[in-house]
Each structure stands twice: as C-alpha cells, then as structure tokens.
Image (cartoon, rainbow, N blue to C red):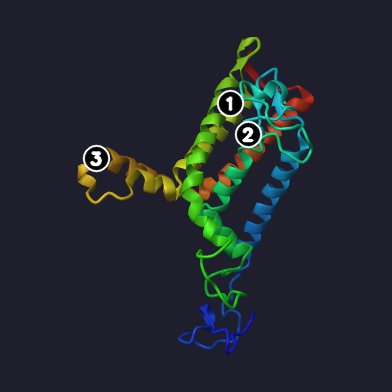
C-alpha cells in the first residue's frame, strides 16, 4: 500500500481522523475466500464468452431454429439462416463477432450494474477487498473521473438491455417453429428458462426500480406505479443472485446449442 506524503494527503485508511494501524487487517477469518471465488467466476464467464463470440461457428441449429444468445441478433454476412429478418450488414471477418451490434451494450450493462461494480471493485480493483481490510490505493476519487464516471450511464444501458431481452424472447418463441411445424425439445426449455432469467435480472435492476417509482413524491397518487415499484423492489433484493444465475444460464444455453449443432441430437418431446 502506498503511504501518504506531504504533497499527497492520505485518504481512506490514511485519513487524519483514522486510527494508525500498521497491519493490513486484524481480521482472522478467511476474508479472501469471497473475492477469490468472485474472480474465478468472472474469469470463467469472460474466457468462455470471449472464445465463443469469436469462434463464429456452431451458434445456430436451423433444424430446430435454436440460436445462442451470444449471437443474437446475428447481423453479419456470415450468419446465414440465423440472421432471420435482420439485415446482414457486418463483414464476415474473424475479429468481429457476428452480434457485434449488441454485445458491447450487454457488456456495458453488466459492467455498470450496481451489483457487478461492487463485486469487481472488491475482487479485482480491491477497493477494498473486504470490510475492515485496507485497500492498496493511496487516493480515491470515486465515480467522478474517467474511467469510473462511465458507471453513471448504467440507466441508459438498461433501456438497450431491455430491447435485447425482447430480441432474446423472440428467439425463444421462434425456436418452437421448426421447418416441419411446431416443435418442442430440451433446447426450447433451456432457451425459455434463460430468457425468463434474463428478464428477471434486467427487471430487478436498480435503474428499473427508479424508472417505475423514482421521482414520486406521493405514492398514494400513483397506485399503479407504486405497485410496480413494490414488485421490482422485491426482485431487487435478490439482484445479486439473478446476476450470477444469468451468467450460468447464458453459458449453459450457448453450450447446449453448440452441442446440438455439432452432434445434431436434441431431446425432442414434440416434433
């Protein structure tokens, strides 16, 4: 940890009003467990999602109309039948993901999420790693300067994430319409569960809670918005849980679609 100097006054644990404790922490519990597990979870998703986004193969099963959410909407010239009615406007090059129009917004929606930022601030940025553990930064400006000031754009990415969730819902519905008519298989179940959880995560967002109930001075005069605010507030209490579940459902959905694309096998109930 960098110590304060005469030209750089201390902040945080080095503030003049704080007790002078030389140890990094007096905690005796396993306080590193949580940030380590968080780092491993993030790393697993980032590595898997990055590889799949740039693999540009085994993302669509035309026979069952299964499209992985990592490639939706598919607007590259290499999308083929997966493009559906979307215009194929992106060049088919290895360094550009087929869903390049949506992936940056989804990434920024997650990066600026109130839960995720708190999680990676502690696990990656170590600000601080855990309660009562000194952080390795001599100064801290909060979210007032670049790059952290970008966190304040979360509410705008929420709107775009809602649109993309609608697109994922469309994909899940279209998967019931195969070239041979109505069909229903395990892939449909996985796609449907994934899109439901994506909606739950999106609607449990703090920005959504503000949209439905923010700026109201009298709840009694707005009973509908008050009811919506109450429902979103209930979801919001488990926003952390939904954030992690959706990382899992996204990977599971993509992996299953990839396996069906490779093997051609899907557990079919109808059609």
Residue 116 in the image, given as x and y percentages of width and height: 55, 54
> In the picture shown, does residue 140 fall above or below 100?
below
Residue 223 is labelled as 3
Q: Residue furthest left?
A: 221
Task: Where is residue 188? Give x, y as percent.
Answer: 60, 25
Task: Name the secondary structure under disc 1.
Answer: helix
According to the image, label 2 marks what residue? 69
Q: CA distance from mark 1 to mark 2?
A: 8 Å
SS label for mark 3? helix
Q: Residues within 10 Å of mark 1 (few under 14, many from 20)?
A: many
Quarter placement of the C terminus: top right
Closest to the observer: 266 or 115? Answer: 115
Q: 242 left or right of 261?
A: left
Q: Earlier in the sequence, mark 1 or mark 3?
A: 1
Q: Is residue 54 left or right of residue 174?
A: right
Badge 2 marks a residue whose secondary structure is helix
Is 114 placed left or right of 138 in the picture? left
At x 66%, y 24%, the residue is: 83
- Say which residue label 1 marks: 171
Q: 56 or 130, which is in the foreground?
A: 56
Marks 1 and 2 in Cβ contact (< 8 Å): yes
Q: Which residue is found at the position 52% from the left and 70% from the top?
A: 141
Within-10-Å neighbours for mark 3: few <14, some 14–19, many 20+: few
Q: Is residue 42 visible?
A: yes
* Residue situated in front as seen by the camera: 107 or 115: 107
Disc with the residue nearer the chain's start (3 vs 2): 2
Q: CA distance from mark 3 to mark 2?
A: 36 Å
- Counting residues from the start of the chain, the first of labels 1 and 2 encountered is 2
């Amino acid at each position: 940890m960098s110590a304060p100097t005469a030209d750089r006054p201390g902040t945080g644990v080095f503030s003049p009003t704080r007790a002078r404790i030389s140890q990094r922490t007096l905690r005796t519990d396993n306080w590193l467990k949580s940030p380590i597990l968080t780092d491993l979870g993030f790393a697993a998703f980032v590595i898997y999602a990055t590889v799949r986004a740039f693999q540009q193969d085994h993302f669509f099963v035309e026979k069952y109309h299964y499209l992985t959410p990592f490639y939706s909407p598919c607007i590259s010239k290499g999308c083929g039948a997966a493009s559906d009615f979307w215009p194929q406007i992106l060049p088919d090059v290895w360094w550009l993901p087929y869903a390049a129009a949506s992936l940056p917004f989804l990434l920024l929606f997650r990066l600026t999420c109130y839960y995720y930022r708190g999680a990676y601030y502690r696990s990656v940025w170590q600000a601080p790693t855990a309660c009562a553990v000194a952080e390795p930064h001599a100064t801290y400006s909060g979210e007032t300067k670049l790059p952290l000031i970008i966190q304040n754009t979360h509410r705008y990415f929420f709107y775009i994430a809602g649109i993309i969730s609608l697109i994922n819902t469309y994909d899940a519905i279209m998967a019931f319409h195969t070239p041979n008519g109505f069909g229903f298989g395990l892939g449909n179940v996985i796609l449907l569960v994934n899109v439901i959880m994506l909606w739950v995560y999106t609607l449990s967002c703090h920005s959504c809670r503000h949209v439905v109930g923010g700026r109201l001075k009298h709840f009694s005069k707005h009973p509908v918005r008050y009811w919506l605010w109450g429902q979103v507030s209930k979801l919001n209490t488990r926003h952390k849980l939904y954030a992690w579940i959706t990382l899992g459902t996204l990977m599971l959905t993509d992996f299953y679609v990839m396996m069906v694309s490779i093997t051609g096998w899907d557990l079919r109930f109808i059609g």
